[in-house]
């Protein structure tokens, strides 16, 4: 026992005598998941797959190339804003954080983010090189508050084998509807031919599903949802039209029901439905299945922007950005952040392998990006996609409220008119009581 | 008071001072600060505008808060009585000095050591209509899967079952401790009077356990009125708020919407509610025993 105690004492003494780590340290906080078990030591960015794999490998690669820096990465559960708000309130925010461009308005308007023109210049990144959507996304009240990382939006992910079975393929391309009535007709035809729902939807614990569909078709009809920064307008014929269509698809069981996001993803890759309207972020994973012999999606996957059902072709988009919460930093830490931002910008193409659209014009126009699967098909989203107006604050909580009420209407829990009125009242109340 | 008495009093105070200081800093101060913030329109980052009772007025007219209150009461009613009954039965069955009883005591206690994340993960695998355990069994016998986590009538019972399973350990241990304190002589006297098993249970065991039972009911009521993690992770309060308890609403108000003043007003209401319900339980039980 005495020998054990002496050994422990020796070990402790050795640890105490270890040289102090004098490297410049920066704290990064990100979402996109935790996959250290698979990508913990990987530095070959070209071989990484999926959001988590690519971002983890990017940080590993940065650390390997910048051994004079200490980069601590804290992975938070998506989207991590409650944790960030608590960290800022406690006066201890990270140096660099992933943030949705729609959420940035709240933090920027409250003075919690640092304008980033200077550090972008220090990193050699010129904002005029951003895509228009990306620049719009990170610019708040005329200042740039982030390094845009991508543009994300909803897409129709399609099982072409089942579409073929339903007679909905023409010239090797899926046939999408061009009106609400045609969508119902296609969905009924699909169900009759395959016995499966036309749509696979994540409707449980996922308010974003209905909101993505709803905002897209409100934008398509040029409906003014936010007449000013303090009000939402939802009791309109345009809104009712969209929600009634979604409700009818559910009522006729033309859409899958009672599925959360993991269940809906599993359902789609197992070939249990025709179309999975979800985000750009799933392209990489679905394409991998489509290239794997024996999988239900093998050589049977296509992806297209949402079809035009009313008005014009449109898509609701958002984007991810790297932002700097306001805090004291040494010049060395700023230089370290600038190096990291530069590295991230240089690898924007690698990030687009997730399925997201690039944040830099040069990447959009590059042969490498165009050569990625399906990118030509989804490229129109870069032109037709729009975010909510920049003056709309609390976009996250608004999505939660609108998604909750739409969910009640679509599942039949509430009449459509009442759900829209409740959503309007709750959002207006939220906006009117902001401190 | 004599000098010696005063000195003893000061010594006593010195012993409890560290605890009192800690208690004041981590409990009394936040409680008072919460009351003050509830009279303000406030965000998480220090913005404060005094609005008097506006937040409380909003709560009175807020249907979402009303729904959350009703959900909280439903959950408490669906959890506390069954949990008390089940853990009492388990304690009675396992109050033996045998290896198998020790094994089962450990087994039933084991769920309590799991974190809420693991518990909800386990129950998601059981309840989800896509490939969940219950769904697989139902499909095997040709029945439709039941959407426990998305049907507004089933989410609260699903949360209640999950919580009962998770919370078996502590009440069972309290009942076991209570059972072991009942003097053996009372059972011997009952046996001499030829009392049957039911009579012994109703006339000896249950009355002897009344203080333990009151403790279990009060602790569990206070705990379930503050239920949070299971609802957040299993149903996120949905569908359409059908399973959103008050604490989840408070969390959403403060950390997602940054409405700290409104959230603290809701927290004060919940605090008063927990205090009132537990006091009523205590006073009712005490009066009955005195009677």
Image (cartoon, rainbow, N blue to C red):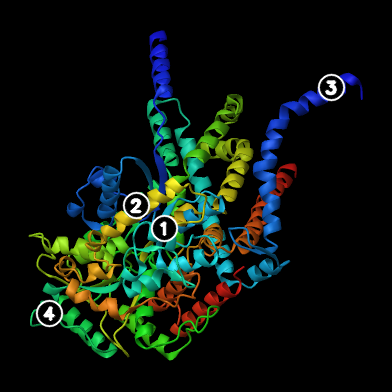
Residues at discs 2 and 1 in contact (Cβ within 8 Å)? no
Sequence-wise, which precedes: disc 2 or disc 1? 1
Circle 1 sits in a helix, a strand or a loop, which is it? helix
For disc 1, the chain is A
Along the viewing direction, whichever of A317 and B226 lies nearer the viewer? A317
- Foreground label between 2 and 4: 2
Q: Which residue is mark 1?
A: A119
Q: Which residue is mark 3?
A: B7
Place residue A292 in its image quadrant.
Answer: bottom left
Q: Which mark is residue A340?
A: 2
Q: Which residue is mark 4?
A: A173
For disc 3, the chain is B
Along the viewing direction, whichever of B270 and A126 lies nearer the viewer? A126
| Residue B283 can be seen, yes or no | yes
Mark 4 on the same chain as mark 1: yes
Measured Cα–Cα span from mark 2 to mark 1: 11 Å
Measured Cα–Cα span from mark 4 to mark 1: 46 Å
Measured Cα–Cα span from mark 2 to mark 3: 64 Å
For disc 2, the chain is A
Q: Position of residue A126 (x, y in %)?
A: 34, 65
């Amino acid at each position: 026992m005495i020998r054990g105690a002496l050994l422990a004492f020796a070990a402790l003494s050795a640890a105490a005598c270890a040289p102090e780590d004098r490297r410049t340290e920066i704290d990064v906080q990100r979402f996109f998941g935790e996959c250290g078990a698979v990508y913990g030591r990987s530095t070959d960015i070209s071989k990484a797959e999926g959001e988590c794999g690519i971002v983890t490998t990017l940080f590993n690669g940065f650390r390997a190339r910048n051994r004079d820096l200490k980069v601590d990465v804290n992975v938070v559960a998506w989207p991590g804003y409650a944790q960030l708000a608590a960290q800022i309130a406690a006066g201890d925010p990270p140096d660099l954080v992933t943030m949705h461009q729609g959420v940035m308005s709240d933090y920027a308007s409250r003075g919690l983010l640092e304008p980033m023109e200077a550090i972008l210049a220090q990193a050699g990144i010129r904002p005029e090189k951003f895509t228009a959507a990306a620049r719009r996304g990170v610019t708040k009240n005329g200042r740039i508050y982030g390094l845009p990382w991508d543009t994300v939006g909803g897409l129709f992910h399609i099982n072409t084998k089942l579409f073929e079975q339903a007679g909905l393929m023409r010239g090797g391309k899926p046939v999408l509807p061009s009106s609400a009535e045609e969508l119902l007709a296609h969905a009924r035809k699909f169900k009759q031919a395959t016995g499966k729902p036309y749509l696979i939807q994540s409707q449980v614990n996922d308010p974003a599903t209905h909101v993505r569909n709803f905002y897209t078709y409100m934008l398509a009809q040029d409906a003014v949802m936010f007449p000013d920064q303090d009000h939402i307008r939802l009791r309109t014929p345009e809104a009712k039209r969209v929600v009634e269509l979604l409700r009818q698809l559910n009522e006729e069981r033309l859409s899958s029901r009672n599925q959360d996001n993991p269940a809906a993803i599993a359902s789609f890759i197992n070939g249990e439905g025709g179309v999975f309207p979800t985000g750009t972020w799933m392209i990489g994973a679905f394409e991998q299945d489509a290239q794997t012999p024996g999988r239900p999606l093998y050589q049977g996957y296509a992806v297209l922007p949402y079809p035009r059902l009313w008005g014009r072709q449109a898509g609701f988009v958002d984007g991810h950005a790297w932002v700097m919460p306001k805090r004291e930093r040494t010049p060395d830490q700023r230089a370290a952040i600038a190096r990291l931002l530069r590295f991230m910008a240089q690898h924007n193409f690698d990030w687009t392998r997730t399925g997201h659209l690039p944040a830099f014009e040069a990447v959009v126009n590059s042969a490498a990006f165009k050569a990625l699967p399906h990118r030509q098909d989804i490229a129109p989203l870069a032109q037709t996609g729009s975010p909510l107006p920049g003056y709309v604050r609390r976009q996250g909580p608004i999505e939660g409220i609108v998604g909750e009420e739409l969910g009640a209407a679509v599942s039949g829990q509430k009449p459509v008119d009442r759900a829209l009125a409740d959503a309007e009242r709750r959002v207006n109340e939220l906006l009117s009581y902001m401190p | 008071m004599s000098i010696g008495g005063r000195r003893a009093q000061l010594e006593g105070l010195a012993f409890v001072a560290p605890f009192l200081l800690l208690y004041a800093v981590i409990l009394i101060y936040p409680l008072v600060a919460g009351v003050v913030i509830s009279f303000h329109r406030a965000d998480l980052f220090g913005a404060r505008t005094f609005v008097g009772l506006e937040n409380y007025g909003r709560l009175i007219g807020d249907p979402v808060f009303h729904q959350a209150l009703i959900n909280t009461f439903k959950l408490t009613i669906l959890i506390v009585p069954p949990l008390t009954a089940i853990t009492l039965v388990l304690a009675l069955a396992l109050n033996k000095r045998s290896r198998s009883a020790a094994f089962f005591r450990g087994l039933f206690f084991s769920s309590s050591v799991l974190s809420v994340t693991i518990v909800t993960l386990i129950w998601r695998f059981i309840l989800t209509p896509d490939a969940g355990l219950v769904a697989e069994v139902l499909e095997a016998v040709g029945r439709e899967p039941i959407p426990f986590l998305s049907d507004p009538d089933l989410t609260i019972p699903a949360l209640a079952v999950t919580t009962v399973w998770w919370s078996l350990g502590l009440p069972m241990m309290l009942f076991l401790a209570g059972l072991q304190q009942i003097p053996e002589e009372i059972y011997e006297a009952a046996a001499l009077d030829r009392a049957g098993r039911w009579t012994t249970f109703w006339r000896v065991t249950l009355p002897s356990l009344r203080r333990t039972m009151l403790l279990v009911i009060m602790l569990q009521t206070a705990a379930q009125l503050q239920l949070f993690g299971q609802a957040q992770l299993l149903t996120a309060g949905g569908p359409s708020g059908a399973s959103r308890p008050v604490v989840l609403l408070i969390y959403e108000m403060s950390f997602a919407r940054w409405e700290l003043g409104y959230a603290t007003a809701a927290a004060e209401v919940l605090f008063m509610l927990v205090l009132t319900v537990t006091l009523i339980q205590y006073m009712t039980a005490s009066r009955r025993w005195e009677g």
